[in-house]
């Protein structure tokens, strides 16, 4: 029987994720599987927790990786924090804000939204005005909008929420590991991310963190969390505490990959990693502008790891990306929703965020345009 | 910084799962990550679907792998098939039947159960009597109870349900790939399994299948599926159809592993794989009895891949397992719930189900007892 795996090419992943994986992470994932209650495996889980706490700047005890992708992390936060009838305010300026609205609605929450033009950031004054009008159990925002490349003001929103009774939920799927994420400093109560963006690990895990305030709010629920798989209290009892108890069979080898990815981040050092993302981004922007291309997002609110660039007149979206993939072995991303066919999304995440990769992409783009 | 991965030992996994992984599966998982919409990756997904259909004996179009562990598969089936107030009958003779009850209850279903003594199978007469009393939307059972090693009569329950309006949900986490699972022949409407049992792949994916009747029942729901991550209709649109649409970022490298595991199964051939499980089981039972040990389950309803054996008087549960793990590099499982401290669970799943592994375990057990 033909094995399709033999035909897999090494593609330079410079789309919106998954990102290009570090070779050491592949090696980590192919280590021997241990039992999910094996004491040596538990040591690795404990280390993952500690490394995630450092990466997120938090002392939250309830910091762990959910056994699903970033979307599972989003749902974990919402399904644990919301009960039917709860008031949530969602700040939306792209696909992932819309996703939060969809999930919160399915959970029976009363959802208010503030919408901002895609490609522009969440505006603080509008949020402040809304918070003056009404009090919320939860306010939710995406830090790095993967659909547009906008850097939302996560710290400023946190400051705005200090003193209010609202819990603060932040999507850090694309930001974590590429720019600063300061859970405790910003007063974030619940955060979720993904393994497959700036951490250079394949998709499959979602790092999350819950503050003490969030843990208390969950303990005070009137109803059980409707999802058993994503019940953070039960997951937390597997990840720590006096007596670990079985909840599900952890994806052991994915945990190895995440652990290795976190070690690589710490070894290189936060400042060096963030600087590498920034310098790659500047080089990319210069190069794109040199090719006559225009970025979607204004300079002051651009993310380094996700660069949305307008597709030049006369260039066909799908054909251009297809040539990059087939001829140059590079993946970039398409636009989503209202931006479909109008932009390309170029990721500079983790291991991919290197100047030589930017050079390779720019050369390929010159060929395509 | 110390890398704990360097200290991982190769442990012969003969517990209730995860099982011992085939070396080719590790190799598969370390192949280069592709994008989740990459056309070559989509080809691999298509092959996974076809291979799962063959393995499960089904032509169900809605056959795929959920991006979570077996527990996510259980929740996927229940959350899509049940709405608040729906009547479900759950046949319980172990931990995983209890889990279904817990999830169904959280979803607001009206849950009836029939309980059978742990270590004994579901009895058809009792089920038939219950079905005469009341009609159900869904009847659910575990095929291979991992907590006890009992082989439940999956085909017979299917026959009983033919002609009734109830949908039939079967947990095939531990059975799939080790004994026959005949979705179409038995009239199963929804089935979930796990990658980490008889398929010899690490945990992280849950193969599922839904019949046309189940798909129609889901389409006729009055309410949206409360989980977005596990919404089978949205997941199905990513796995097939005219226009694939983004739902979540698939755990690419786990899919490689599952694909390789399925290829290995097909290459060896169903009959050979099942025979290997049976002969390993017979050798194990003979050996255990030779050591004076007694099996929990009566011969006629024993599973080959999960062997529950009573811990002999005078032998300490945790100490015994710990010696097996530390000195002999073999993992076996503890008892759960009422069987904790009373039994050990010995898995003979997939790649582990070989006579040389049985020999190695028996030699080690002789040392421990």
Image (spheres, coloured by chain):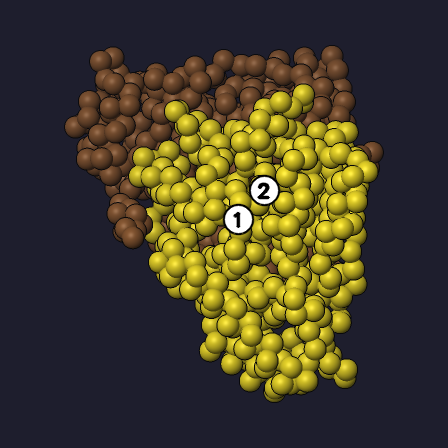
Chain colours: A brown, B yellow
Q: Chain of mark 2?
A: B
Residue B142 visible to an observer of this rendering: yes
Rendered image: mark on residue A247: none
Rendered image: mark on residue B182: 1
Q: Is residue B198 above or below residue B206?
A: below
Q: Where on the picture, by quarter, is residue A227?
A: top right
Q: Is residue A67 above or below residue A75?
A: below
Report whether A237 appears left or right of A312: right
Report whether B292 appears left or right of A335: right
Name the foreground residue: A19 vs A327: A327
Q: Residue at x 31, y 27 (%)?
A: A285
Task: State the CA–CA distance, disc 2 to disc 1.
Answer: 8 Å
x then y, percent, for residue A6? 27, 51
Report whether A51 appears left or right of B251: right
Q: Is residue B226 above or below residue B72?
A: above
- Furthest-left residue in view? A367
Name the foreground residue: B8 vs B167: B167
Rendered image: mark on residue B188: 2
Residues marked 2 and 1 touching at CB (< 8 Å):
yes
Q: Residue at x 73, y 81 (%)?
A: B312
Task: Give the mark, 2 or 1, whose residue is nearer the N terminus.
Answer: 1
Secondary-structure class at tag 1: loop
- Number of other residues with Cα within 10 Å of mark 2, as a class: few under 14, some 14 to 19, many 20 or more: many
Q: Residue at x 72, y 74 (%)?
A: B310
Report whether B342 appears left or right of B186: right
x then y, percent, for residue B274? 48, 63
- Number of other residues with Cα within 10 Å of mark 1, as a class: few under 14, some 14 to 19, many 20 or more: some
């Amino acid at each position: 029987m033909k094995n399709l795996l033999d035909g897999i090419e090494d593609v330079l992943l410079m789309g919106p994720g998954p990102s290009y994986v570090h070779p050491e992470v592949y090696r980590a994932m192919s280590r021997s599987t241990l039992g999910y209650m094996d004491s040596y495996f538990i040591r690795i889980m404990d280390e993952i927790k500690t490394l995630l706490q450092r990466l997120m700047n938090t002392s939250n005890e309830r910091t762990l990786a959910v056994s699903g992708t970033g979307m599972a992390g989003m749902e974990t936060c919402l399904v644990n924090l919301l009960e039917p009838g709860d008031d949530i305010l969602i700040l939306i300026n792209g696909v992932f804000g819309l996703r939060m609205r969809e999930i919160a609605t399915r959970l029976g929450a009363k959802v208010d939204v503030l919408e901002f033009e895609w490609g522009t950031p969440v505006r603080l004054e509008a949020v402040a005005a809304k918070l003056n009008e009404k009090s919320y159990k939860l306010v939710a925002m995406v830090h790095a909008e993967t659909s547009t490349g906008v850097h939302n003001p996560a710290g400023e929103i946190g400051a705005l929420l200090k003193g209010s009774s609202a819990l603060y939920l932040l999507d850090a799927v694309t930001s974590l590991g590429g720019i600063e994420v300061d859970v405790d400093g910003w007063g974030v109560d619940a955060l979720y991310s993904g393994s497959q963006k700036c951490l250079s690990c394949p998709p499959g895990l979602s790092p999350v963190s819950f503050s003490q305030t969030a843990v208390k709010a969950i303990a005070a629920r009137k109803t059980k969390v409707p999802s058993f798989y994503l019940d953070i209290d039960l997951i937390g009892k597997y990840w720590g505490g006096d007596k670990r108890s079985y909840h599900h069979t952890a994806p052991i080898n994915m945990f190895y990959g995440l652990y290795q990815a976190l070690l690589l981040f710490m070894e290189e050092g936060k400042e060096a990693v963030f600087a590498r993302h920034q310098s790659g981004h500047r080089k990319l922007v210069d190069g794109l502008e040199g090719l006559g291309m225009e970025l979607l997002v204004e300079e002051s609110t651009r993310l380094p790891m996700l660069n949305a660039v307008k597709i030049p007149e006369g260039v066909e979206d799908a054909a251009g990306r297809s040539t990059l993939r087939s001829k140059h072995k590079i993946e970039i991303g398409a636009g989503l929703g209202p931006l479909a066919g109008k932009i390309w999304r170029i990721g500079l995440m983790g291991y991919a965020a290197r100047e030589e990769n930017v050079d390779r992409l720019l050369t390929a783009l010159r060929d395509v345009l």
